[in-house]
Image: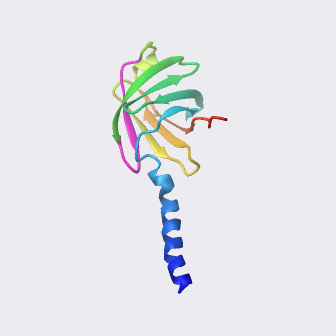
Amino acid sequence: MFSRTVKPRALGLAALLGLLPAMALASPPQGEWRGLVQQANSDVSIVVRFNAQAANVHFDEPFSCDVPARLLKADDTATVYRFSVSTNGGRFCDGLTGHNLNLTPASNGHLKIAFDAVRNTWRGELSPPAASTP
């Protein structure tokens, strides 16, 4: 009798734990995430600062620019932002205006990132904010 009550609970818990990566984006990410985006033979480091309704993306060299983005949707499978006008210009960042920034959960707790630029699609992965130490 004891084993019958344990098995359904254990199976339920296992099913719930299996859904955690998919549920990771049920609400927009928060804090400062860092990573690398690539296309063809180009790699660029980025920092994305998220708050409840927006994100600010900083692209390191060679672009050295910042682009704000507003939240469009967040569900269990993806979070989508729309790039606004670059705060400090530059051909690359100005070309992102009106394009979507797409985030999906990765199995390792990171975020997969993808967005279209003028001539190509950039993809990469963001690492979560570092845990604070006591």
Q: Position of residue 100 (x, y in %)?
A: 37, 34
At 33% from the left edge and 40% from the top edge, which residue is drawn? Answer: 73
Specify whether residue 39 is in view. Answer: no
Q: Do we see residue 52 in this rendering? A: yes
Please, which residue is most extreme toward the bottom here?
A: 1
The residue furthest right is 134
Say which of 120 and 132 sits in front: 132
At a point 50% along the width and 17% down the height, the residue shown is: 65
Give the vertical position of 58 relative to 34 (above or below).
Answer: above
Above or below, comparing residue 24 to residue 116 in the picture: below
**Residue 80 lies within the magenta run:** yes
- Residue 48 lies, in percent from the top left, at 50, 29
Residue 37, quarter of the rendered image: top right
Can you give x and y, in whole percent of width and height, for residue 118 in the image? 41, 27
Left or right of 100? Residue 134 is right
Which residue is depicted at the point 53% across and 23% down?
59
Which segment is the magenta one? 74-86
**Among the 4 quarters of the image, the one containing residue 96:** top left
Residue at (55% x, 83% y) in the render: 2
Q: Position of residue 69 (x, y in %)?
A: 39, 27
State the residue in front, 29 or 98: 29
